[in-house]
Amino acid sequence: MDGRDTIAALATATGPGAVTILRLSGPGAFSILARLCPGPSPAPRELVLRPVIDPATGELIDRALVVRFPAPASFTGEDVAEIQAHGGALLADALLSAALAAGARAARPGEFSRRAFEGGRLDLAQAEGLAELISAGSEAGLRAARALFGGELSREVGALLERLEGLQARLEALIDFPEQSGALDEEALARDLAALRARLGALHRSHAEGRRRREGARVLLVGAPNVGKSSLFNALVGHARAIVHAEPGTTRDAVEGRLELHGLGVTLVDSAGVREAPGEVEAEGVERTRRALEAADLILWVQDLGEEAPADPATAQLLGQVGEGQRILPVGNKRDRAGEGASHPLPVSALTGEGLGALREALAGALGAAGEGSGGEAGVVLTLARHEAAAGIALEALEQAEALRAAGGGLDALSEELGEARRQLAGILGRIALPEALLDRIFGDFCLGK
Ligand code: GDP
């Protein structure tokens, strides 16, 4: 870490608040602290009260609690100091200016975390987990972020890497020293490759569940025009966003709304009407619905209990396109208008609110069930697209290796595929050199002072 400068940033949000924390990291952290807060150097990790002096003017800025974290037992792995002063935007400005006047450089967003990564305190997936913790938008998203930051994914990827390395080392020994290494145990190789592929495959597939936890499940409302999709959307989301109209086919755009069901974030999507209509705009709406259908985790099929259900070939056709693993939950709307004897497993009324609680429960149940059984070893799931992409390429390489083995391909080619899988998995953890632009993008998304 020689040659590094010392960075400073406010670690608390600016504005009125009880405390402002200034954080310093780098080889000069303690000397800058001494200039700002004169007095005997505090023992490591011990909070002491000190005056904070502006080194330019000698003026007293505040009295604050200060603490030192000597390297390497600090967040960044460098010498870190923190000054916990009183809150307030002007005080925060004065504190940061004083630190800069005393020789620190203003940190870029995510620079502390980047130093923690470069100092080996966090791997890249954990650093991403930290950003996820801060930006989590639901209970499920927060839990997923905590697991990522806590190293759950890192341990699983690390275990896969170890097995890949072992396998590749065996192949390399066979290539380099065929006499000493004995004959290739074809059966063992096939077995090991298949086991690795299965474990990596499960991890890769878990992204559907991971994405659901992070971003929430997508629920698409479909049904004939005028059955009450928009009304139901509004009743569930809780405010009037979708256009409700008595004329069929007026909901032209897919409208989205967020709700939370038992800690799982849900994005509710109100589709455009699916009836084939002459207007160009309507046709676009139909196309949008098809695309929305593909992205949906659950399809809420709204039926009308209020009248003799007319044939609805457009919806029937749409439901025919529902993919494998997608579920359909039928709901009967306009319960208030239903005649005696009308029966439906899930009767509701968007108008009176009747049955909406049961609908929420049914949705939560269906979405929870959709997530069951997915996930890799020990329930580890891939939440981030970057990890999914890398795991996908690694999986392809393993499949290629299996195909090569089955076809009696050379050991060199086989080993190369294993090498590609290793590089991809190592990239998830940041164990190999990654493009600077990628690291800038990952850490640039962090907030200042993190
Ligand atoms: P969409 O075309 O499927 O989105 O249907 P809308 O939500 O626009 O509703 C069509 C018409 O049905 C409107 O006049 C609504 O007020 C009415 N409507 C919707 N839900 C109910 C309900 O539960 N009961 C009754 N009586 N009318 C409803």
Image (cartoon, rainbow, N blue to C red):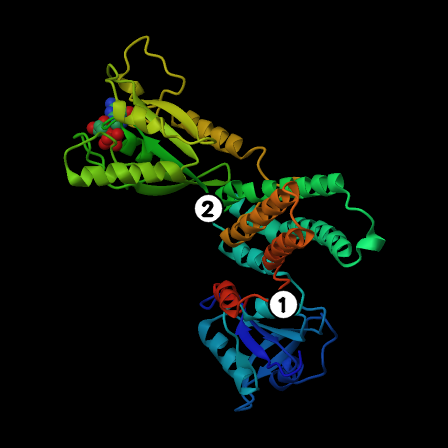
Rendered image: mark on residue 367: none
Badge 2 residue CB within 8 Å of ligand 1: no
Residue 402 in which image quadrant: top right
Give the x, y percent position of residue 250.
19, 35
Which quarter of the image is occupied by the C terminus? bottom right
Q: Find disc 2 in the rendering and name its residue.
A: 215
Q: Report the amino acid beneath label 1.
A: Ala
SS for callout 1 = helix
Q: Nearer the viewer, residue 396 or 140?
A: 396
Task: Locate residue 446 relative to residue 406 in the image: left or right.
Answer: left
Q: Residue sitting at 56 percent across and 90 percent down?
A: 58
Q: Find disc 1 in the rendering and name its residue.
A: 116
Q: Is residue 448 visible?
A: no
Circle count: 2
Give the x, y percent position of residue 61.
53, 81
Q: Nearer the viewer, residue 316 or 140?
A: 316
Q: Residues within 10 Å of mark 1 (few under 14, many from 20)?
A: many
Q: Residue sitting at 61 percent across and 62 percent down?
A: 430
Which quarter of the image is occupied by the N terminus? bottom right
Q: Nearer the viewer, residue 166 or 248?
A: 166
- Residue at the outermost bottom position: 57
Q: Residue sitting at 59 percent across and 59 percent down?
A: 427
Instruction: Find ligand 1 in the image and state its quadrant.
Output: top left
Q: Is residue 257 above or below residue 425?
A: above
Task: Locate residue 414 relative to residue 90 in the image: left or right.
Answer: right
